[in-house]
Image (tube, helix red, strand yellow):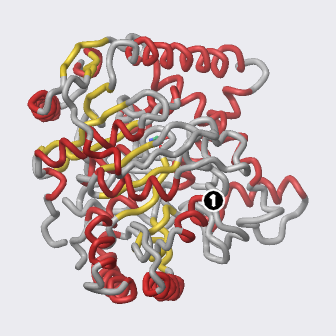
Amino acid sequence: MHHMTLAEIARGLADKKFSSEELTQVLLARIAQLDPQLNSFISLTPELALSQAKAADARRANGETGALLGAPIAHKDLFCTLGIRTSCGSKMLDNFKAPYDATVVAKLAAAGAVTLGKTNMDEFAMGSANESSYYGAVKNPWNLEHVPGGSSGGSAAAVAARLLPAATATDTGGSIRQPAAFTNLTGLKPTYGRVSRWGMIAYASSLDQGGPLARTAEDCAILLQGMAGFDPNDSTSIDEPVPDYSAGLNGSLQGLRIGVPKEYFGAGLDPRIADLIHNSIKELEKLGAVIKEISLPNMQHAIPAYYVIAPAEASSNLSRFDGVRFGHRCENPENLIDLYKRSRGEGFGAEVQRRIMVGAYALSAGYYDAYYLKAQKIRRLVKNDFMAAFNEVDIILGPTTPNPAWKLGAKNSDPVAAYLEDVYTITANLAGLPGLSMPAGFVDGLPVGVQLLAPYFQEGRLLNVAHQYQLNTDWHTRTPTGF
Ligand code: GLN
């Protein structure tokens, strides 16, 4: 049962082959058995899951239908869940039970999805390896000595290990696409504003976006359908109609213009990954796509710009964790300043503290123009590059990451080495564009992802291309040994 995709589960439930309650029991038992190897969950919610599953079964018995009705999922532990711990992977929020559901959580629950638990993540979503979590590192099911990627590493490891078919995740600089690449999943970062950020604990508000992680593009379409849409509670949510993503999967790729940026194949890219990306280009050509070389000349400036803007926004967002209103509070503070200092010093881990300091520095009066303002100008240039490219092509294709998943601990002593691995993903966040990563093969037994980027609100185009590719390749069906 655990091998089924969301689409297969929906058919099985509709045909009464099994109930959501039965499926939920199977998956909860599987998580109890296998997750100790992976550490992909921070909290399990078996009671909630079983009551949601029973309610979904009752709704189906009453004639209701829907692809998510009775479908088991999990939420990255930065989506607020009413009455359930929402930790953001941090000691700071270890004791925090959210007083409301995030819009994404509420929408998926209303569609009948069953929440099995909250998944592990890098602390405050800062990271690319899921090693900065207060709850310990997550292991990659493809090789337990390697990282699963981050920051949505728990969602990725759990879905890749067939503990559940799909999970929510968020992407500020690659945290959906990069763990998808590292664990052989399909992951979609939507256009900024497509999915509500209300109740999603903020890392960098102008970059953060929630989206689906699943094994197939077909399943990403189903989950995105349940997540997307205008939300008056989020002032950056955009009031655009949500297309029927599943209905759009079967469009022909005949004549589709794919741009391949020449800058993507420079030094730093593992040549074996380059070969796999070229193979996926050939596959898409067979399906009728036309390939064109393009240029994104400002790409090289994107990492430094991102690592000023994201920490700057984080330093502001995380100022709310002061030991006064919620979260960790130190013992016996001597005065208010001592309360702030020790609560924050004890509650935040090293990477979070580093970024708060970098961000506060970049925003400080003497340095604002030199760092923050300059980074914002680069951000505009990166966006302009994409706008020019999309005048010529329909999608942009390249690697998701320059290297496959590294060994646990390999980059812990050198944060900048980890930052450099984000080179292909962060430009989409700076520009607010949608991006998808899908399985493209293996290097040394570790999965490799190919990334597709599209113009604003063209999530459907990404899903269509990925689905057609997956109908003609079988990388996404490969299962890690032991799971
Ligand atoms: N690796 C990037 C960072 O550490 C992106 C993280 C994310 O997308 N949440 O900031």
Residue at x 27% of width, y 54% of height = 216
Camera-side residue: 100 or 306? 100
Residue at x 42% of width, y 54% of height = 212
Q: Position of residue 231 (x, y in %)?
A: 67, 50
Residue at x 13% of width, y 33% of height = 287
Camera-side residue: 275 or 52? 52
SS under mark 1: helix
Q: Which residue is mark 1?
A: 103
Q: Quadrant of the C terminus?
A: bottom left
Q: Position of residue 478 (x, y in %)?
A: 13, 58
Q: Is residue 467 left or right of residue 383?
A: left
Q: Position of residue 160 (x, y in %)?
A: 27, 62
Residue at x 27% of width, y 28% of height = 397
Work out which residue is located at the far right of the displayed protein and give it: 335
Camera-side residue: 258 or 132? 258
Residue 361 at least partly seen: yes
Say if 256 sits above or below 445 in the image. above
Camera-side residue: 201 or 92? 201
Question: Mark 1, residues whose alpha carbon is within 10 Å: few (<14), some, or many (≥20)?
Answer: many
Say if 345 sits above or below 481 in the image. above
Q: How many marks?
A: 1
The quarter of the picture where residue 104 lies is bottom right
Q: Is residue 5 left or right of residue 340?
A: left
